[in-house]
Structure formats: structure tokens, C-alpha cells
Amino acid sequence: MERIKHWDPENSQYWKSEGKRHAQRNLWISIPALFLAFIVWQIWSVVAVKLNDVGFHFTSSELFTLAALPGLVGATLRIFFTFLPGIFGGKNWTVISTAALLLPAIGIGFAVQNPDTSFTTMAILAALCGIGGGNFSSSMANISFFFPKKLKGAANGMNAGIGNLGVSAVQFLTPIVITTGAFAGIVGSSQLMKDGTEVWIQNAAFIWIVPIVIVTICALFGMDNLPNAKQSFKEQAIIFKNKHTWIMSWIYTMCFGSFIGYAAAFPLLIKAEFPEINPLQLAFLGPLVGASVRPIGGWIADKIGGAKVTFWDIIVMIAATVGVIYFLNEKNFTGFLIMFIILFFTTGIANGSTFRMIPIIFEPKQAAPVLGFTAAIAAYGAFLIPKIFSWSISVSNSANLALYLFIAYYVISLGICWFYYSRKNAEVKC
């Protein structure tokens, strides 16, 4: 493949004649790579639910910790991964970071077959899944360079939105693949659940090995390192001196932190609050909705402005969270599920609209690392939200305390968005 020697997507003639096809090719390889990264990142949200059913003896707190650890590590890795495409090149880092997903995928596949596997070993494997979380920041920082400003909202929305679908995919497909002996006799035998059902928990991890290898090869031969996208850490670190980096980190945590945190905690939360419900039959619906509408959020923001979309979306988020509390107290699972799906919907719209705001607020070379850094901070939601739910349930036997805290965060976010970006005389109109 011919190496790109010049890149100027804001030049309309260059974009039409050459830039567009390169950008689209890189985007369509980046999307499945990010999709698989989210799958590996969130695999514990469903595996943790089944461990004690096949002979493990972990406490509720330990299970929530396994679901939360990938979030903690992933968020921390995002801080570093943000700057690596600019240092190593977008293509090079995509190949390395996608291939690295094989480590937890293979490790989990073997570890879950032995009920004597220690919690420490499981925790290490959960931490390794954080690689998948880290990949989001590097992916978004890379793709941001490929598109002109007028298309960044839609492009970032596509990359992130379809990538986010990996959360829903792993929660939907895992209950299916663990009930079939796809790898029986090759990489382990089945396990028996308490009700006598035969399952293959290892399939939840092993099923993704071949796709990871294929996408890594596609990235190696199909993606590009852009010539004018490389910049040192020192050049990128200027973003930390801009107050809007920190403001947008707060706002993006409000939406993406909620999305990924709720996705990680949702199956265990359903099991804790509604023990009569099989969480793996329904938990995937929320992340599916949230991820699916993210590109729509970016597209609408391209049309009417990201700040306006984000502001009104937060109001709906607050209302939906109040609805979750109401139906939780009423022990009405149908209402609880509907309200949570609406909540996931709002996180998805705001995910797209906030990522549209950033390229408007910042110049291109700053926008890329800011996208990655805000995503890094927001990813801590994948650790904090499950842990806050776990704390709330342990001290009050209910998730209500956690949900009240989230409402307070959303109210503060609404005020910040209004003051800096969406009011009539806002400091920045975006």
C-alpha cells in the first residue's frame, strides 16, 4: 500500500480526490478494532455473573471488583494511550494495542475452567482487560486527524458508537456461546451449573481470539501513519494548561462514564435487586441502545451544535435516573428496565454530542489528545460506578444512595454545560 506523504483534509479538493478514501479505509478498520477492544474490556461484566454458578466461591464484593477492575486499569491506560498514536503513529499503535487483546482473551479462557483459580489470578486477568479500555483513547485520537472539522462529529460518532456496541455484543453473545461446545475437546471440557446445565464458560473468551488476529492483520496492511499527525508528548501536553480540557473531562465523564459504568454494573445490579430475573437475558439492551445512538448524537450535534444537544440531554438523564429510583422502590422490574434503557439512550446521545464539542473548542493538534484524555478520565466510571453500587447495596441493601449521588453529578454537569457553552453569552459557542 502506498504511503501517504501529504495530508490536508480541510482542503476540499484534496479531500474529494484523495483524502476521503484514505480516511474511510482507516475508519472502517479502526471500528472493528475498537469493537473488539470494548468486548475484551467488558467481558467480566458477564463472566463474573456466572462464576459462582460453576463452582467458584467469590463474595458479592469480589464479583463487583472483577467487573470494576478493567475500568480502573482501562481508564489509567487511556491517559498514556492518548499520546501514543502521536508518538508511534496511528497505524503502528493500532496493530500493537489490538494484538495485545490476545493476552486476557487467552488467559481468561483457561482460568475460568478451574474453580480453584485464585481471586488474585482472576483480578490480574481482569486488570489485563483494561488494555481494551485504553484502546479507545488511542483510537479516537488517531481517527480525529483523518477527517475535516465539518465531519469530525459523525466520524468520531461512528468510530466510538459502533465500537461501543462491543459492550452490548459481549453481553448478548456470551450467554449463547457458553452453552455450545464450540471448542470442546480442544481447549477444555464443560462445567456443570447448579441446576445441572452443561456450559463452557471458556467460550466467552476464546470466541474472540480469531477475530482479534484477523483485525490485527487488517490494521497492519490497511491502515496509515499520517505524516503531519506525529507530535511529541511535550507538544501534546499543552492541553493540560487549557481549562476547557478539564471542563470537558468533567462533562464527558457525566455521559461516557455513566454509559460504561452502568454497562459494567447492570447485570450484577439486576441480580442483586431483582434476583428472580436472569440478568444476562436483558442486560445487553441498555448498552445496545446507548452505543447505537451515539453516532446520531454526533450527527445532530453537527447540525445544531454540541452544547445545545448536551444541555437538553442532561435534563432527560436526570429525569430518567429519578424514574429508575421510583421503579426500584416499587420493585417494578419492567419500569426499572425501561427507565434504565432511557438512561442509556441519553448517555449515548451525549457521548456523540460532547465529542463534537471538543474539535470546535480546540485546534486540530490539541483536539486529538484532548479527545483521548477526556475519554481517559471518563473511563474511570467503569470502575467507580460498580463500586459505588456495591457500596450502596452493602450499607443500605439498595442502589438508591448510588443513584442519588449520580443525580447530583448530573445537576452539576448541567450547570457547567450551561455556563461555559450553551447560554446566550457563553465563553465558547460549540
Image: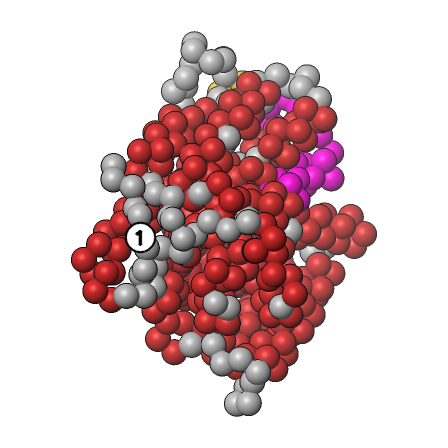
Q: Position of residue 423 (x, y in %)?
A: 55, 86
Compared to residue 105, the image places residue 69 above or below, namely below
Q: What amino acid is found at the position of numbered circle 1 in the picture?
A: His
Q: Secondary structure at mark 1?
A: loop
Can residue 316 be spotted in the picture?
Answer: no
Report the residue at 53% width, 80% height from top. Answer: 428
Quarter of the view holding residue 392:
bottom right
Snapshot quadrant of residue 408? bottom right
Asked if residue 40 lies left or right of residue 415, the reply is: left
Q: Which residue is found at the position 34% from the left and 43% from the top?
A: 224
- Density class for disc 1 (Cα within 10 Å; few <14, some 14-19, many ≥20) is few
Where does label 1 land, which residue?
A: 6
Q: Among all residues in the image, which is located at the extreme left? A: 17
**Magenta-span inclusion, residue 248:** no
Quarter residue 29 falls in:
top left
Q: Could you tell me residue 211's position as x and y percent?
A: 37, 30
Q: Residue at x 25, y 56 (%)?
A: 20
Q: Nearer the viewer, residue 202 or 30?
A: 30
Q: Main secondary structure of the magenta part?
A: helix
Any part of residue 286 in sight:
yes
Residue 370 in percent (x, y) is at 54, 60
Q: Magenta span covers which residues?
A: 53-75
Q: Who is closer to the viewer here, 14 or 425?
A: 14
- The single residue placed furthest to the bottom in the displayed view is 424
Q: Nearer the viewer, residue 17 or 55?
A: 17
Q: Is residue 377 left or right of residue 209?
A: right
Percent across and percent down for residue 293 are 40, 60
Residue 60 lies within the magenta run: yes
